[in-house]
Image (tube, grey):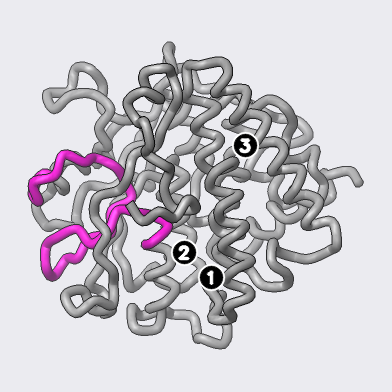
Amino acid sequence: MTGDISTEEDQTDLQTRRARGEFVRGVSGFRRAIGDPETPAEPGRYHLFVALNCPWCHRVTLARSVLGLEQAITLDVAFPNRTGEDDPEGPNLWEFAPDRIASLTGAPLPECTAETGTGAGLRLAKEVYRREGSEEQSVPILYDKRAQRIVNNESAEIIRMLDAHADALGSTVSADARVVLWPRDPARQAEIRELNELIYTTINNGAYKAGFSSDQEVYATAFAAYFDSLERLDQLLSDGRAFLTGDAFTEADLRLFPTLYRHDPVYMLRMKLNGARILDYPHLWRWLCRVYGLPGVAEAGSLLHCRQGYFGRSWNGVVPLGPLKPMPYPEAYGHPELAEG
């Protein structure tokens, strides 16, 4: 563990906490870095395995997109629902299955791909790990195609690597026009670090702690912390700043976006976070619309995959069709004026 609470959850008394019904996120096991001698920053060398419904993957696809790395870093996309009990490898595994039918649409999802990163045509993300003797099975995975091995599977570290080495990796956006997710200014870094801790603990991971814990007290605590943080961030943005730390989009904004993007159409119902909509926080709503309008952001995610993934694995597999008012999502994200106040 790194000890950074903005990156990973405290694992103290892990088994006891899980036994009483608390959702506790595990720790990612692969922590190499682009820029190390064995993993130099080179165009075309690296590959990402992701699922578009996964918010941790969404961080990485956002970074890849806003940093202009779509052509430099290749990508495979898993089907949003994992394997079932009838799969020979077992249930709950990420699968690269471009022909699999989505119950929401009755057709394959065009974003889903076969596995191409290893060159072996693997079916499951778990098989990528198995080649290295690991039993992990999570995404995202940053993969070195030349060395044929996993570099890193911690999204917080991957996005910072992509930012630090964007030029060497082959960004198509010039340095003067490209966002800087982790600025060099120590004061700005400290501000981002503080926001990251709040956002990860109470919002990113907080949504999962509310949605997947089976203990009422744990759920209630997570619920309260989540909405307290939304209120705090709404107040932060009330001074008219465009982004969380001022006029520039940074890592803090990128890490907040995947959860808020999912909140109204998915998390209110699926994660039992029905205290309010993001639309009820006028400054946060306008921030959400502003970020969604940045070049590459809309293309880096998919609410269709989110709906299919989160609800398609519920007890009956039926995917809700709403919300439809005041307008469907994600179209609503093009309308900052929908928020009152």
Q: Give the Cα distance between marks 3 and 1.
A: 23 Å
Mark in the foreground, 1 or 2: 1
223 or 328: nearer the eye?
223
Membership of 138 in magenta stretch: yes
Measured as percent of width and height from the top left, residue 59 is found at 47, 55
Would you say 292 lies left or right of 38 here? right
Residue 263's disc is: 3
At mark 3, the secondary structure is helix
Nearer-N-terminus badge (3/2) = 2
Mark 1: few/some/many CA within 10 Å (<14, 14-19, 20+): many
Q: Is residue 128 magenta?
A: no
Quarter residue 292 falls in: bottom right
- Which residue is at a point 55% across and 34% down the rendered structure image? 207
| Element on which disc 1 rests | loop
* Dot 3 amino acid type: His
Three-letter residue code for mark 1: Leu
Position of 234 relative to 81 (above/below):
below
Callout 2: few (<14), some (14-19), or many (20+) C-alpha neighbours within 10 Å? Answer: many
Q: CA distance from mark 1 to mark 2?
A: 8 Å
Residue holding disc 1: 181
Image spot of residue 242 (x, y percent): 75, 65
The picture quadrant where one finds residue 68 is bottom left
Identify the residue at image location x=78%, y=57%: 237
The residue drawn where x is 17% and y is 65% is: 145
Task: Give the number of the disc on residue 63.
Answer: 2
Q: Which mark is residue 115?
A: none
Q: Are marks 3 and 1 in contact (CB under 8 Å)?
A: no
Span highlighted in magenta in the image: 130-157
